Image (cartoon, rainbow, N blue to C red):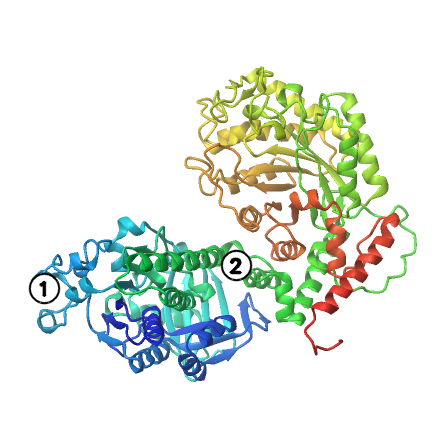
Amino acid sequence: MRIAVIGGGPAGLYLALLVKKADPRHQVTVYERNGPDDSFGWGVVFSDQTLGNFRAADPESYQRICDSFARWDDIDIHVRGATITSGGHGFSGIARRTLLAILRDRAAELGVELRFRCEVGEAELPQHPDLPRAELASADLPAAELASADLPKAELASADLPAAELASADLIIGADGVNSMTRRRYAAAFAPDLDVRTARYVWLGTTRQFDAFTFIFVDNADGVFQAHAYRFDERLSAFIVECDEASWRAAGYDRLDSAATIAACERLFAPWLDGHPLLANVPPHLAAAPWLSFVRVRNARWHHGRVVLLGDAAHTAHFSIGSGTKLAMEDAIGLARALAGAGAGQPAELACALADYQEERMTEALRLQNAARNSMEWFENVKRYIGLEPPQFAYSLLTRSQRVSHENLRLRDRTYLTGVERWFASRAALAAAAAAPPASDPHALPAAAPATPPSPPPIFTPFTLRGMTVANRVVVSPMDMYSADDGLPNDFHLVHLGARALGGAGLVITEMTCVSPEGRISPGCTGMYCEEHAAAWRRITEFAHRWSGAKICLQLGHSGAKGATRLMWEGMDEPLEHGGWEIIAASPLPFRPGMQVPRAMTRADMELVRGQFVRAAELAASAGFDMIELHCAHGYLLSGFITPLSNRRHDDYGGTLANRLRYPLEVLAAMRAAWPAERPISVRISATDWAPGGLAEGEAVAAARAFHQAGADIIHVSTGQTSAAARPVYGRMFQTPFSDQIRNEAQVATIAVGNITDADQVNSIIAAGRADLCALARPHLTDPHWTLRAAAELGFACQPWPVQYLPGKQQLERLLERQALLSEPRGSSGV
């Protein structure tokens, strides 16, 4: 094939040498706008896993790259006067200039034609790359029309213009970076999605040799500033300075050119530079404004006819996870592999090869972009975390992408993680002790101190709200069972909730229990609106308190516009066959087409329903619940007031967020007054509607803060289910970032929920301060004893088991020991 590669960066050069190596008959030409020795940027970082891919693809260039590496294992984090080190991370750094030279020389050895200082303009690309190239050879624009190319007139006259070559190429590869001209030329086909972020950064270098991958944080009157620094050869380190836009403007950096920026950053980070200078290496057009904004690039399609995108032209990953060049070069490996079976002049074969490449690499790119998004947002919002104590701040940083978990850190550096666990457990124990009631006999002698056990993992540390202390951080999430009779919980609920209390969770939350018959979602929903209900619930709370250490919480709610529907297995959100009962809501809008239209609530309705919530709280207290939760999420009545998607009122209860919160806060305040002072109250909210026109940015934090001020002790952070138009972005722990934001910006305790499935995730969430408790739903449906099993798997022997189940504990521990022995590599210590 005749292959034209636009862009001589790592992606383009690596693809060129790989396809030429695979079949020397290919005619491969690389067009690069810069000179052979031009390189803007500093160092590139690779992980050990990435290097394995390079070794398999081309051992020769792999060896040359490895011979040029600077290697390190540690990450150093400098924050608020502390330095925290975590080891075992396995990084390798190389100068970008060196990497390009290695790839350039290897490509030339294999016979790739390299055209430097050769600008390819949009006009030189075929207008219809989806047509056979034979039809295009005569259709390209004449060379005279290329005068708009960004080359000086003198160079333009003598330049080897590639228009004709591109017209006759079998394959055109757009490897021309984040500002890809190729992508722009065929934007209608690629459908690019460019997200320009607001944080600012400048990529500098320094002669200061950093022995670890180093993060430095400076918190001053202007804001928070961070440096990402790492050594990449025997002389130089990269030094990226980043800050949010408000800090950037407050410090006056928006008015500085390159020289003034360097001087300002040298002053800011002087204690860590040890007198070494900072250095700039930017294209001339950035000298006057050297600060950049990161652009997250995605494309709906990566290929169009005989044109395909590669590397940053197809996708970008934030520099804080150091994977942009990795992704680009692995793209090259994937594309070269896909092209190996495509014959010249066979458009169908080429189309299949490009489709295979896109399917394989787009999945990997999206996976890494999700991790990069988490990391990027952490650094963009570092002000949110700067107040954390240094050990928790550092742990939050290390686990920010959700790719490095608690147990992964243990594998990397057991000593570091043991120290984190010890620190976290001591803080949790102090908090629990401070909240404990005084001893009944102030003159009693203190009990002998027990032997100090190993520090528990974060999941098994206590947590206190008012007078309630839960033994661990696991919550059985509220799950509607649709199995009540006229609101009355029965034997099913006793067994269902009792089994999960026996399973070791610190807190069990009931399904949404409705405050009136008309407030039920379905005829099968539980209620708390008469003494018979309280008596039935008391049977359940007494079982939990007698036979387990679990605390139990009653979730109270009113269905609003989602009421009078069938049981879940009869049709979710399907209206009752004969209409059921009248429903009310903030506004007369059906939750979705086909559902009953609710009546807009009057002030009299509001007072009636508020009284029903108060009555339910009083009954809950008499039934022995340790905690209650007010349901203000998922499109039910109170949630319907909060989201602008369903609140179209024009009175004091609609419009601004303060107005939309007015009634839910009124209900909470009334419940708080009726609920015992020593018992906590939770509020569950939907932090985003996942739909256009829903909650605005920052409104979830403001709502959580308002609920906290009105008496809520903890916010249960869910998302969505407020609109039939919602389009959630699912994934592992997909709602945890909302809990993180609310906890650390509103300064209120939170419960995280949403696709949290294992103890490792719970440990990471709790230790990083992203939530105080973690609620798991489906895992508890499949395994009521999820918490007991997690304790055994983590080797936490102090987790209490029901005495009746102790033989099962011993069997489980023996089974896990055998599995651990079988999984150890042969020849390892202890086998």
Quarter of the image where the N terminus is located: bottom left
Q: Position of residue 446 (x, y in %)?
A: 89, 57
| Quadrant holding the C terminus | bottom right
Q: Looking at the rendering, which quadrant does residue 334 occupy? A: bottom left
**As shown in the figure, which amino acid type bears the numbered disc 1?**
Ala
The residue at 40%/54% (across/down) is 246
Q: What residue lies at 46% left-to-right and 77% top-to-bottom? A: 55
Where is mark 1, residue-wise? 143
Mark carried by residue 401: 2
What amino acid type should be assigned to the residue bearing mark 2? Ser
Left or right: 667 as drawn, with respect to 356: right
**Residue nearest the viewer, comparing 422 with 195:** 195
What is the crowding at mark 2: few (fewer than 14 residues within 10 Å), some, or many (at least 20)?
many
Q: Which residue: 28% across, 50% down? A: 189
The x, y position of residue 416, in whole percent, is: 65, 70
Name the image quarter holding residue 523: top right
- Farthest-out residue, right: 444
Instruction: Between residue 68 and residue 306, name the one nearer to us.
Output: 306
| Distance (Cα) linking label 1 and label 2 | 48 Å
Number of marks drawn: 2
Percent across and percent down for residue 111 are 28, 79
Relative height, residue 64 to residue 149 (above, below): below
Residue 14, x across and y down, in percent: 35, 72
Q: Earlier in the sequence, mark 1 or mark 2?
A: 1
Q: Nearer the viewer, residue 384 or 807?
A: 807
Can you tell which quarter of the image residue 317 is in? bottom left
Given this view, does label 1 or label 2 mark the residue nearer the observer? 1
In the drawing, does residue 570 fall left or right of residue 19? right
Residue 174 visible in rendering: yes
